[in-house]
Amino acid sequence: GAVVSQHPSWVICKSGTSVKIECRSLDFQATTMFWYRQFPKQSLMLMATSNEGSKATYEQGVEKDKFLINHASLTLSTLTVTSAHPEDSSFYICSARVSGAGNIQYFGAGTRLSVL
Amino acid sequence: QQQVKQSPQSLIVQKGGISIINCAYENTAFDYFPWYQQFPGKGPALLIAIRPDVSEKKEGRFTISFNKSAKQFSLHIMDSQPGDSATYFCAAPTGTSYDKVIFGPGTSLSVIP
């Protein structure tokens, strides 16, 4: 149980284009999902908390107009990197919290974004 | 800024040995203290988690020891195997949010044959 699917696993795009990453909870309903960014050999950096049916809460320093988050259903959250630039190249990972399981998060496999 | 300190940064253990990774947190203990295992290019996977009202939890070769008074907890991997070679992250409650956690900086474990 508690499987989180993230798609795509790898995406290459040209500078200035937008990229959408999907995060789905496959066998449970996730009222709260999280989006992280991870640089090589570093820890996970929380970007935003996504709550179903409401606006996402962004961490300090994260541009909400650059990283658009939509949590339209209890099983799907999306992260759109708008007008991507090479400095946005990174490993993006989503996670979901199971209701009733406290702060335990289950992670997707991650998306490697390369902006040329 | 709330922090979770993790040590060592890297660890090399011989196959069959015991791997020990330590974490220290700053906030009030409530909810779970999980450990995650991450292989290169993959997302973290939940390994084991403990609640602060328990001092030890064991699942197979993995054991968490929790010291609430010292605000420390550790992961012990018994009979370490080459397949355990990965990066391990501890996480602790933020103290201000019931769903967010703070991750430690990670420990790179290499188990050599």
Image (cartoon, grey):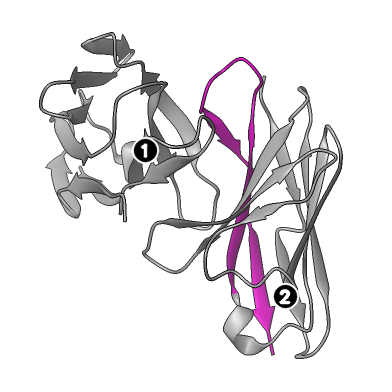
User: Residue at point 61% right, 61% down?
Assistant: A92
The residue type indicated by label 2 comes to: Lys
Q: Which residue is mark 2?
A: A66
Query: Where residue A104 appears, x then y in whole percent?
Result: 51, 27
User: Residue at point 42% right, 69% down?
Assistant: A40
Q: Nearer the viewer, residue A77 or B93?
A: B93
User: Residue at point 69% right, 35% down?
Assistant: A32
Q: Left or right: where does residue B1 sit relative to residue B36?
A: left
The residue type indicated by label 1 comes to: Ala
Q: Left or right: where does residue A38 sit relative to residue A51?
A: left
Q: Which residue is mark 1?
A: B91
Residue furthest to the top: B54
Helix, strand or loop under label 2: loop
Query: Where residue B5 appears, x then y in whole percent?
Result: 21, 48
User: Residue at point 39% right, 44% down?
Assistant: B102
B105 to B29, vertically: above or below: below
Q: Is residue A93 magenta?
A: yes
- Residue segment shown in magenta: A90-116
The quarter of the image holding the N terminus of chain A is: top right
Question: Is residue A109 visible in this depiction of the protein?
Answer: no
Q: Chain of mark 1?
A: B
Question: Is residue A39 visible in this depiction of the protein?
Answer: yes
Quarter of the figure with residue B56: top left
Query: Where residue B85 appears, x then y in whole percent?
Result: 32, 45
Q: Left or right: where does residue B35 sit relative to residue A85?
A: left
Q: CA distance from mark 1 to mark 2?
A: 27 Å
Residue furthest to the front: B96
Query: Local crowd at mark 1 within 10 Å, few (<14), some, or many (≥20)?
Result: many
Q: Chain of mark 2?
A: A
